[in-house]
Amino acid sequence: MPPDFTDPLYADPDAYDVAYGWDSSAETAALVGHAAQRRGRPIRRALEIGCGPGRVLRELAALGLDAIGLDREPALLECAARRARECGLTVTTQLGDMRDFVLDAPVDFAICPLNGVCDLTGDGDLVRHFTAVAANLSPGGIYAIEMSFGPVEKQFLGAPAPWRRSQGDLSVEADWRLLDVDAETGLAGYEASLHIARAGAAPRRIVCRHVHRKWDQPQFYRAIADSPLVLAAMHAGDLTPLDPARRLTYADDNVFVFLQR
C-alpha cells in the first residue's frame, strides 16, 4: 500500500474538484462505446486510474457501470466517494499505486485521463504500470490513455494557460505551466497553481512543482511491446481516428491511446 501523504496541489480536494471538474460526460460515453465496439462485448465494469476527486469516475457510474476509482491520495478518494454520493451515484474507491495494484475483480475498461501516466517518471515505471493494468483487465479488455507526446517545442515553455471555474460559493482559478524539459530524458517540470476564493473566507493560493515524463512515440511504443498489452487504436482529442504511425509531438495536444489485453 502506498504511503498516506498529500501532494500540496491536492490539499483542498473540493477546490481541486471544482478546477478540474468540467463536464466530459459525452466524451466518456464515447470512449466507453468505442471500447465496447472494439472489445465486441458490452462494458460492465470500469476503472479510472488516478481518479482524484472522481470527475470521470462519476461519469462512468452515471452510465450504469460498476465504477472503481484508484488513487494514491487518501483525501482525494474521500472526496470522490462523497461527491459521488452527493450526485446519487455508487462508486468504489481503492487506495493504490498505479504501478502495482490488485482489484477484487477484473474490469472490462480502464481509463487514465489528463496525462496521468506522465506521473510515471522512473525507469521501468511505464512497463510496470501496463503489466498491472493488464493483470486487472478481463480478456479483450480496453485501456484508454489521454496523453500528449514529446518532444516539447520551446514555444510552450513558460506559457500560462489559466482557467477559472466556480461552483456554489467556491471559485477557483487554476494554471498548469510548463517550465522546462530535459530533451534527453523527457522529464518536464511544471508549476501548478490554484487560487481559491470561498465566500466568507480569506483567499488561498496553492503553488507547487510537478515533474512529468513526456515520452516520444518510439519510447512509448517500446514500453507497450514489453508489456502484455497491444496498441489497438489512437484517436485525437475530439475522438477523430488517427494513424498510430503518424508522428506526434507536444504541439498536437492530448490524444487517446487505446491498448488492449
Image: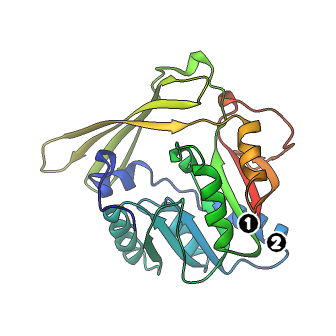
Residue 35 image offset from top left, x and y in percent: 76, 66
Q: Is 83 placed left or right of 233 in the picture?
A: left
Residue 137 quadrant = bottom right
Q: Is 153 placed left or right of 233 in the picture?
A: left
Residue located beneath label 1 in the image? 142
Colour basis? rainbow
Q: CA distance from mark 1 to mark 2?
A: 7 Å
Q: Nearer the viewer, residue 202 or 116?
A: 116
Q: Is 240 placed left or right of 181 in the picture?
A: right
Residue 247 quadrant = top right
Instruction: Evaluate if marks 1 and 2 touch, with contact meaning CB atoms under 8 Å apart.
Output: yes
Q: Secondary structure at mark 2?
A: helix
Residue 97 image offset from top left, x and y in percent: 47, 62
For image coordinates 64% across by 62% down, the residue present is 28
Q: Secondary structure at mark 1?
A: strand
Q: Sort mark 2 into few (<14), some (14-19) or many (20+) by Cα contacts within 10 Å.
A: some
**Above or below for 48 versus 124:** below
For image coordinates 53% across by 47% down, the residue present is 120
Residue located beneath label 2 in the image? 39
